[in-house]
Image: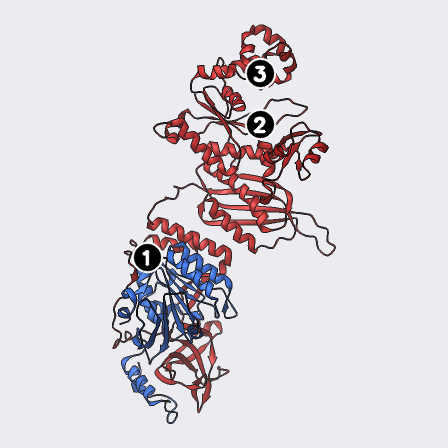
Chain colours: A blue, B red
Amino acid sequence: MLDAQLPGGGWPRRALSELLLRQPGIGEIRLLSPCLTSIQRSGRLVMLFDPPAALSAWALAQLGFDVEQLLIINTRTRALPSGDSLWALEQALKSGHVGAVLAWLPPRLRAERLRRLQLAAHTHDGPAFVLREMTAAERPTAAPLRLALKPAGADALGVRLLKRRGPPLETPLRLALPPVLSNSAREQARAGLERGAPALQGATFINLAGLL
Amino acid sequence: MLWVAVHLPLLSLESFAATLPAASADQPIALMDAHHIVSANASALQLGVKPGLKRATALALAPHLTLAQADARRDEEALRAVAHTALAFTPIVTIQPANDTIGAEQAAPDIVLLEVQGSLRYFGGHERQLQGLLQRLQRALVPLGHRLHMANAPTALGAALLARVHRRFDGSDLALTQRALDAAPVWLLGPGRTHWEALQGMGLRTLSDLRGLPRSGVARRFGAALLDELDRAYGAVPDPRISIALPPAFESRLELFARADTADQVLHGAGLLLDRLIAWLAAQHAFVRRFTLVMLHEPRRSRDKPAPSETTLELALAEPSRDRAHLLVLLRERLANLPLPAPTLELRLHAADIARRAPPNAELFPTPRSEREGLVRLIERLQARLGHERVQCLAAVDDHRPELATAVRCADAQSIGRAHAAASAVAADALTEKTPAADYESAEPAPGVKVRPVWLLSEGQPLDERDSWPLLEGQPLQLLSGPERIESGWWDMRLVERDYFIAQLPDGALVWIYRTRQLVSNPRPGWFLQGRFG
């Protein structure tokens, strides 16, 4: 469903794709995992720059990644990536040998640095995803594609295309992600969301019948 | 036999100019012996400084003149680099000993002789063999930055003598060489220099004059050495030469003229040493795996602690290489992070660990092999700048405890590259990356497989509770799936006894939380956040 809305029918190569989220852990890795795993399967390197928290090798293996062949550049000191990470990202983009790049950029990034990254991405034969905080949506970007992500229920992600080549898209999309919950649990989650605040009354533990 | 002589007329000046910082390449420089100027570079000559002037006169003509003395060891190292470059073209390379006895000291040798008959077809190409080979030789010598005069002749000494006279001489057959030698001045011959006045008094100016005299008389008057040299130059007597041997380990030093305060100045000097290293490597068709740069500092007297007098920087490469640009980039990154205690006075480069393998394939379109080499170089560059511990790889560990189930270790450039070389061909070039269309609307995780979140916290974050119901950032969590009981780790004193649940935030995001069981061993029963499903 997202492919139909993206220009060219898929994630763009040789250009930055900007993803904005308020907080990590809403399903962004699951959204990108089909694309990144297929790049890994074709034998090219996937690099991660400054992931915001520790990664779980089991979870990545479950999503289809070849965990040993992921390269992670971690320059965070006290939860903020340092200036060296932008240099490393530019080097990886310019080299042209990396298959895909997934980078968490420092907050309040200057526009000209993003433009430099976009120029470097021209020599990069593959998708380049940069993830930033939602407050960056107010400022213009040099990346040709910009998406805002927010959770839309269990195992689903709400995507708004803020910027793309071509006509703008007004309505947000709701995409289903590779699942974490079973069907019955998902039903329960949907019911819980519609109800509003979950029941604080009653038992402190949930019904054993609705479990994995 | 075809000998090529490469004469470096400005060797002493150029080897001295290499010790100066990069910015002062065009300034006037002159070399002097005890009292008089011996040689001067182009900008000094323009100002009027000529060989033979006294020191005070030269300084009056050019106040900013840099004066120094010729150093035989420095010249010899520079000439050795040229000889090593020549060794890549032919195994028979020798240095013509200088036998000028001007003054009391020997002048430094400045001619390298190569015997190239065997290498003509391979290096020169099918037609214009000698020209092709000489062009390749000149191109290879460009990084060393010397002015070259070249001559070729059937005899070694003949080529050497003619290289001193002409900028470029082509003596393809013996008769042509002999005619050219006839016109050469007589002071070129070593013994001729000592007897210059006597020869001039007799009116003998060129070698043809000398050849016209009776041989016994010349031998008696000027010594047999003069006659022997004449015969060898004209090809009447064989002239066997012993080729130089390549040293097993590379060692070179550069004494800087001005002390180097910044990393850039050190890098400029190191660049020249790298050029010599590459010449030595090219002579044996090998690649370097590891080399060491030693920087000797100015001695400082400090009462608190003595400053170290030298700093050693060792650079090990994941893949053996002799690419100047790549080695210089790595050196630059390492130097940027290295604090130098004092200004640097001298640089030394050692290399002993080399590898012989096929040279990298320079192709137009990337193949898996060249891509792997490019990847290895990229990883090396990142490791050099950021440090090895910041370039990481993951590995899954067999442990039930989620926070210990992932091991982070430093990436090994070789292992990353190798796995990719074994993969199939690169995906077809398309403008976009198609995400495979999968329908997840009613999909489920496979039964029996434990689901784990992508993002983990290494230590559980305690959650607030309301009526013993967990809250995250003030919002109540709805438990959806679980409990999954993990009880493990009794062997290393990190016992965990937890029940894990998948919970949902009011906006729909999924988190992984756990509740510690109420056991005696647990210090803090309660709800904790372990991870988020990214």
Front label number (1 vs 2): 2
Q: How many marks?
A: 3
Q: Quadrant of the N terminus of chain B?
A: top left
Q: Is residue B427 above or below residue B8?
A: below
Question: Given the image, what chain letter belongs to the residue carrying mark 2?
Answer: B
The answer to which of A44 and B162 lies nearer the viewer is: B162
Do marks 1 and 2 share a subunit? Answer: no
The answer to whether residue A41 is left or right of residue B106 is: left
Chain letter behind tag 3: B
Q: Position of residue B202 (x, y in %)?
A: 62, 9
* Residue B512 in which image quadrant: bottom left
Residues at marks 2 and 3, common chain? yes
Amino acid at dot 1: Gly
What secondary structure is marked by label 3? Answer: helix
Neighbourhood count class around disc 1 (C-alpha, 10 Å): few under 14, some 14–19, many 20 upward: many
Residue B411 seen in the current view: no
Three-letter amino acid code at the position of disc 3? Val
CA–CA distance in space, label 1 to label 2:
56 Å
Q: Which residue is mark 2?
A: B109
Q: Which residue is mark 1?
A: A43
Which is in the foreground here, disc 1 or disc 3? 3
Q: Nearer the viewer, residue B526 or B55?
A: B55
Assess disc 3: are there few (<14), some (14-19) or many (≥20) residues with their C-alpha within 10 Å of its C-alpha.
many
Name the element at disc 1. loop
Instruction: Give residue B534's quadrant in the image.
Output: bottom left
User: Which residue corresponds to mark 3?
Assistant: B186
